[in-house]
Amino acid sequence: MSSSAVVFREKGFWCRDGALEFWLHLLVDEIDRLDSVEPWLSDLRDHWHEQSKIGGSGIISVGLDAEMTTHQIEQLIKLNKKAMASMWAFGESIPLDYLNKTCTPGSYYSSEVATKFYVQVGEYFQALLDGTLVVDTNFGRYGRTIPS
């Protein structure tokens, strides 16, 4: 499976496309639960929805803009935390019916996936947004691919 670089303000990490598509789907779900959505976030939501359906080709663009305001970044951090909580609400594994709802048309999961498999994606995304991401550059500019 391919991997895509998740980059924001000259920092980033590599992520397996399937895991990144799943994470973007979780973030879209969180945005869809909001009572009101600012135009910039609505645009990002639509972009994430589109990117979550690419199908693992190594070209996923998360679309984070280096010029994002502090307010926008704070909103994304809150959304990411909500996505983590929603993911853990599934328990030890993500149900098969939910996983298949997140798939690219024509693909599917054959079994449940351990929730912990996606934890690193959320943690790395959080660290990227809050500026605390540290990568081992022995694995290239953006470090090692996750989940490993």
Image (cartoon, rainbow, N blue to C red):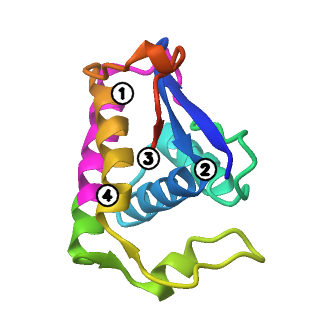
Q: Is residue 44 visible?
A: yes
Cα distance, mark 1 to mark 4? 15 Å
Magenta stretch in the rendered image: 63-84
User: Taking 101 as reference, is 32 left or right?
Assistant: left
Is disc 4 surrounded by few (<14), some (14 to 19) or many (20+) residues within 10 Å? many
**Residue drawn at the location 59% of the way across and 44% of the way down:** 43
Which numbered mark, 1 or 3, is in the foreground of this view?
Answer: 3
Q: Secondary structure at mark 1?
A: helix
Q: Can you say whether 62 is above or below 113 in the image? A: above
**Which callout, 2 or 4, points at the residue further toward the start of the chain?**
2
Cα distance, mark 1 to mark 2? 17 Å
Which numbered mark, 1 or 2, is in the foreground of this view?
Answer: 2
Q: Which residue type does callout 4 highlight?
A: Ala
Q: Secondary structure at mark 2?
A: helix
**Which callout, 1 or 4, points at the residue further toward the start of the chain?**
4
Q: Which residue type does callout 1 highlight?
A: Leu
Cα distance, mark 1 to mark 3? 18 Å
**Which callout, 2 or 3, points at the residue further toward the start of the chain?**
2
User: Taking 126 as reference, is 56 left or right?
Assistant: right
Cα distance, mark 2 to mark 3? 12 Å
Cα distance, mark 2 to mark 4? 18 Å
**Residue drawn at the location 58% of the way across and 49% of the way down:** 48
Q: Is residue 63 visible?
A: no
The residue that label 3 is drawn on is: 148
Q: Which mark is residue 17?
A: 2
Q: Which mark is residue 128?
A: 1
The residue that label 4 is drawn on is: 83
Which residue lies most toward the front here?
138
Q: Secondary structure at mark 3?
A: loop
Residue 20 position in % (x across, y down):
52, 50
Is disc 3 surrounded by few (<14), some (14 to 19) or many (20+) residues within 10 Å? few
Q: Can you say whether 13 is above or below 40 in the image? A: above
